[in-house]
Image (spheres, rainbow, N blue to C red):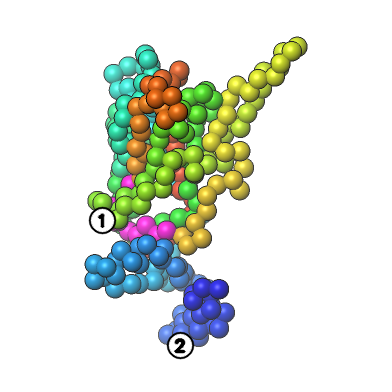
């Protein structure tokens, strides 16, 4: 049992709220900060604080998501050899209406809700916060199984907050299954059954990584996730060569907190 759970069990929070004239359970949310964020802040002389949105708040469960196309081709829609250039590919750094070239697209002039629901790239809007419980990485349903497999083998994920003040390396993206999409449909002939397509994790939302302590992205905080890609597969040291474009989506699921609900 954590300290916060003990406090809740003893009713300390409810008694405090009653004394200051706030009805317990209405418009008040007390969250535990992830340990690494507390350590990071305290090491820089910042006071630890509980995340709360106050009394006038609307809470909604929803996704926060960002999508890129691999390999990036902003000149045309011809994939050519399909080689994925080694480097860093930022997510959540672009928002609705931004140029599709920022996310590797030629065919998408301006990004829409199909690619992201970030109102603006790079930060949480004023008056809003996001409490993240789940993180998953999913692929477009038409992606070829072999192409997905190459992406899983050569791509790593990290979290970057406040322009590099806090960096967490999450490891290979295969550690973060998406729990969505096609899992494996088969073409059956007289003699054989062959799996033709696959996704990153069985299409069941229980098959995703969940944070025991939710990560909180506060109003106006600058953040991004970054996928770092290698140009060669680790087992055979061969060039990554996708046969078709692959869309890789990073999605976060949790609670939106709006200070001024309408």
Q: Please provide percent x and percent y for residue 256.
A: 44, 56
Rendered position, 98 above or below 222: above
User: First in sequence: mark 2 or mark 1?
Assistant: 2
Residue that label 2 marks: 19
Q: Please provide percent x and percent y for residue 131.
A: 44, 58
- Residue 109 as seen in the image, left or right of residue 198: left
The numbered disc on residue 165 is: 1
Residue 201 on the magenta segment? no
At mark 1, the secondary structure is loop
The numbered disc on residue 197 is: none
- Residue drawn at 55 percent across, 73 percent down: 1
- Residue drawn at 33 percent across, 72 percent down: 48
Residue 222 on the magenta segment? yes
Q: Nearer the viewer, residue 169 or 235?
A: 235
Q: Please provide percent x and percent y for residue 244.
A: 45, 19
Residue 49 in view of the camera: yes
Q: Nearer the viewer, residue 69 or 126?
A: 69
- Residue drawn at 71 percent across, 16 percent down: 192
Task: Please give the range of residues in magenta.
Answer: 215-224
């Amino acid at each position: 049992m954590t300290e916060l759970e003990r406090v809740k069990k003893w009713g300390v929070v409810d008694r405090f709220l009653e004394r200051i004239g706030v009805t317990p359970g209405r418009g008040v949310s007390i969250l535990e900060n992830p340990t690494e964020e507390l350590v990071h802040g305290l090491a820089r002389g910042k006071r630890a604080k509980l995340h709360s949105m106050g009394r006038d708040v609307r809470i909604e469960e929803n996704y926060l998501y960002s999508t890129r196309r691999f390999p990036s081709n902003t000149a045309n829609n011809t994939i050519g050899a399909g080689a994925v250039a080694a480097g860093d590919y930022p997510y959540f750094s672009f928002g609705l209406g931004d140029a599709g070239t920022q996310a590797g697209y030629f065919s998408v002039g301006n990004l829409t809700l199909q690619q992201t629901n970030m109102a603006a790239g790079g930060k949480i809007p004023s008056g809003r916060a996001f409490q993240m419980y789940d993180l998953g990485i999913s692929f477009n349903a038409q992606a070829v199984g072999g192409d997905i497999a190459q992406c899983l083998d050569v791509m790593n994920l990290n979290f970057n907050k406040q322009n590099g003040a806090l960096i967490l390396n999450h490891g290979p993206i295969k550690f973060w299954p998406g729990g969505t999409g096609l899992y494996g449909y088969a073409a059956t002939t007289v003699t054989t059954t062959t799996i033709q397509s696959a996704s990153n994790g069985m299409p069941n939302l229980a098959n995703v990584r969940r944070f025991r302590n939710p990560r909180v992205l506060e109003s106006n905080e600058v953040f991004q996730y970054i996928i770092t890609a290698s140009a060669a597969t680790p087992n055979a040291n061969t060039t990554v060569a996708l046969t078709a474009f692959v869309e890789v989506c990073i999605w976060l699921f949790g609670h939106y907190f709006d200070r001024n609900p309408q």
